[in-house]
Image: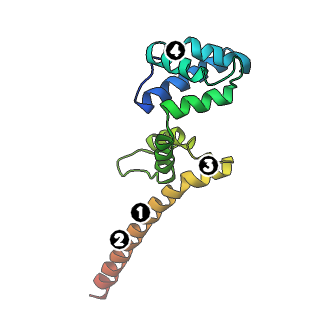
Amino acid sequence: MGATEFEGTLDPEIAERWWEKVEDVMNLISCTLENRLKYVVSLFVGNALIWWRSVKRGYEPGEITWAEFQKEFDDKYRPKMYRDKKRMEFLNLVQGDNQTVAEYELRFAALAKYAPEAVVTQEDRCYRFEQDYDQRLERVLQLELRILKLLLSQLYGWKKR
């Protein structure tokens, strides 16, 4: 159930998974906004603890807010370049030919948080999700129509004989 210690990492994916687990635990235990910073920092060890101590020196004691801490953490472990890359991944997301709808939906859900302005409402989410599906359906229907036209032309040609 509990979150694990965080040593720091150069891999934003690892930092992302750790952060999500920590948020899940904090929500589960109804951790107050005031205690979130204390809880997260208590999980820092090694390089992460060294980093935190250096960040903390730039603030007056007790002055750093949860939002400021989140920004500091993001800048260090989930940099803007990484978040921008994930945002573009979401905005350009298409269902691959060998990808099931379920697999596409999981990828869609995982990346949507990087472009919140694109999925503000449930209607927005549905629209974005359906865009690729509609394109694929259109291709299938065009193919089926071509096959039907071929079939009809062959049937009409056969009947004239």
What amino acid type should be assigned to the residue bearing mark 4? Answer: Phe
* Viewer can see residue 150: yes
Q: Earlier in the sequence, mark 2 or mark 1?
A: 1
Residue wearing tag 3 = 125
Q: Earlier in the sequence, mark 2 or mark 3?
A: 3
Residue wearing tag 2 = 147
The Cα–Cα distance between marks 2 and 3, rounded to whole angstroms, is: 34 Å
* Residue at 55% in and 43% down: 114
What amino acid type should be assigned to the residue bearing mark 2? Answer: Ile
Mark 4 residue element: loop
* Residue at 48% in and 30% down: 77
Label 4: few (<14), some or many (≥20) within 10 Å? Answer: some
Q: Earlier in the sequence, mark 4 or mark 3?
A: 4
Task: Point out the frontmost of discs 4 and 1.
Answer: 4
The Cα–Cα distance between marks 4 and 3, rounded to whole angstroms, is: 36 Å
* 129 vs 152: above or below: above
- Quarter of the figure with residue 160: bottom left
Residue wearing tag 1 = 140
Pointer 2 with pointer 1, Cβ within 8 A: no
* Residue at 37% in and 73% down: 146
